[in-house]
Image (tube, helix red, strand yellow):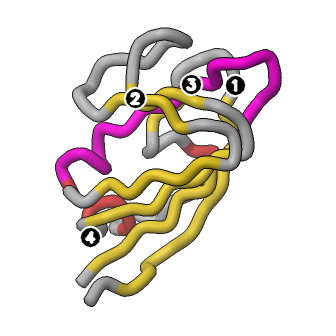
Amino acid sequence: MSKSVKMKSATISNAAKAIDHADFAWGNADLGTANAAWISSTQAVRYTFDGTDPTTTLGHPIGADGTVYIPDARLIRDLKFIRTGGSDAVLTVSLLED
């Protein structure tokens, strides 16, 4: 059973923001020890986990007030986000570890 390690939020605007951006304020080892993550957003965003920057039309969507589960540590470390609408999104990420 996984347990929550840390929960952080950051504002996602019209420029791609990586999971390791300073706005999330993760500790040195937080991303390295996580093996899964729950992500929720107040507004529509898109995300990628292959190292490319998402755009308003490229990437996996999370709808307004939507949630997604990322079950793989490798994918978590490469997450990037961008808003898709006219309003900034507040993205909340809960990192999990065994």
In the rendered structure, which amino acid carries the disc numbered 2? His
Q: Earlier in the sequence, mark 2 or mark 1?
A: 1
Q: Is residue 22 above or below residue 40?
A: above
Q: Earlier in the sequence, mark 1 or mark 3?
A: 1
Give the number of the disc on residue 82.
3
Write the start and end of the magenta stretch as one range.
74-90
| Between marks 4 and 2 in the image, the one whose residue lies nearer the viewer | 2
Image quarter hosting the C terminus: bottom left
Q: Earlier in the sequence, mark 4 or mark 1?
A: 1
Q: Residue shown at 27%/25% (left/top)?
A: 51
Q: Position of residue 96 (x, y in %)?
A: 36, 74
Label 4 belongs to which residue?
33
Q: Residue shown at 65%/55% (left/top)?
A: 9
Give the side of residue 94 with respect to residue 12, left or right: left
| Between marks 3 and 4 in the image, the one whose residue lies nearer the viewer | 3
Q: Position of residue 24 (x, y in %)?
A: 58, 51
Label 1 belongs to which residue?
13
In the rendered structure, which amino acid carries the disc numbered 4? Thr
Give the side of residue 85 with respect to residue 51, left or right: right
Looking at the image, which residue sits at the far right? Answer: 87
Label 2 belongs to which residue?
60
In the rendered structure, which amino acid carries the disc numbered 3? Ile
Give the side of residue 96 with respect to residue 91, left or right: left
